[in-house]
Image: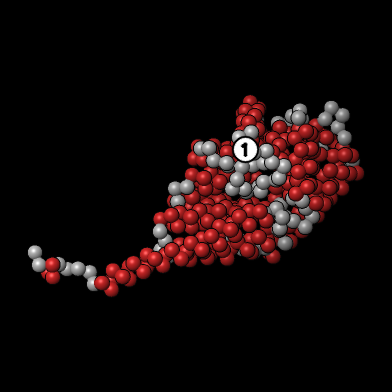
Amino acid sequence: MNSGAVPWEPEDSINARRLALKSSLDDSFRLAYLEAEVQQAIADNERVTPVILIARLRPLRSYVDQLMAGRQHPPQRARLYAVAAHLSGLLGALALDLGAFGAAHAYAAEAFDLAEAAEQSDAQAWARATQSLIAFYAGDYHDALAYAQDGLRRGGASGHRIRLTINGQARALARLGDRYGVDRAVDHAFTMLSDYPASSSVSASLALDPYCPARTAANAATAYLALGRTAGVTDHLTTAITAFDTAGLAGPRALCRLDLATAHLHADNPDPEEAGALAVEALTLTADQRFESVHQRARQFLATAHPFARHPQLRHVADLLADRAQVAATGQAALPSLS
């Protein structure tokens, strides 16, 4: 057969396609930049205000969308989808901090969809943990449990299994009144901690790595207090407070103090004075930051403290919380749109 009769593509077309393939490799440095930004944002969460962090992350999320409209090799494409998933999940958690539940649910659902599209089980487990967190504070405890269990199924031996078990399963089970389930989840979480090197450092709340002992202890205490049990709670909280104080994390420091305050009210000899002092300290620590979790935990503390409502220290807590609620309501117009 005469080779000249074969309808070859023009060499220019082949070379152009080859150049396009090579040019997609340029996205590697962009991906490295974005992955570093995600890690930094996770580390900065709880250290800077949600509004400041949102202002940093939204342009990055838009930039990722621009890159996703281009062409990448499959491994790069998967990395890009994982970055997008983590950015959306971060934005969902920050929306939760501000009490914007609609945006929080939407961002977290998008995070999971991106992780699933990338077929990355680790990112799927992380996204499910974030969805579980948001559902928990929305009061959707069955959803919180379902997300956590699905994350565990998808993540396998992922480092996220401690977070999914203690932050997702244990706390949701406690709200659903499953005492046996809470015991099993807490025991399993502490057993899993032994699979990782001992560390005194505090993991980030949305860490891509395993949960630390301090966060595991703090979540165990929250779960047990929801069941009205105080055995071992003070020890867990002492461990957590020491670590969070050293790390200088206002949100966790406040939440643990509110839990310890609640434990004082559940004691055989309730101490409303000490409980009130701890609650005041918690609200003072987070006076300049908007954490929906702290607001909810403070309201739960006051509900537990109702029999002592006339105590001056507890009236002071109620006044502080009312002032914060008023400031939060008047400040909504100043928040960036999260849609």
The x and y percentages for residue 187 are 64, 29
Q: How is the image coloured?
A: secondary structure
Front one among 323 and 71: 71
- x and y percentages locating residue 148 in the rendered image: 56, 39
Secondary element at image label 1 = loop
Image coordinates of residue 54 in percent, x first then y, are 63, 61
Q: Is residue 218 left or right of residue 143?
A: right
Q: Which residue is mark 1?
A: 196
**Residue found 87% across the figure and 35% down from its top:** 271
Which residue is rendered at x = 85% and y = 39% of the image? 275
Residue located 43% across and 63% down the image: 25
- How would you rate the neighbour count of disc 1 (Cα within 10 Å): few for under 14, some for 14-19, many for 20 or more? few
- Quadrant housing the N terminus: bottom left
The quadrant holding residue 163 is top right
- Residue 172: give x, y in percent of width and height: 63, 37
In which quadrant of the rendered image does the C terminus lie? bottom right
Give the amino acid at mark 1: Tyr
Count of number-bearing discs: 1
Residue placed furthest toward the top: 180
Q: Residue furthest left?
A: 1
Q: Is residue 239 above or below residue 53?
A: above
Query: 89 above or below 266?
Result: below
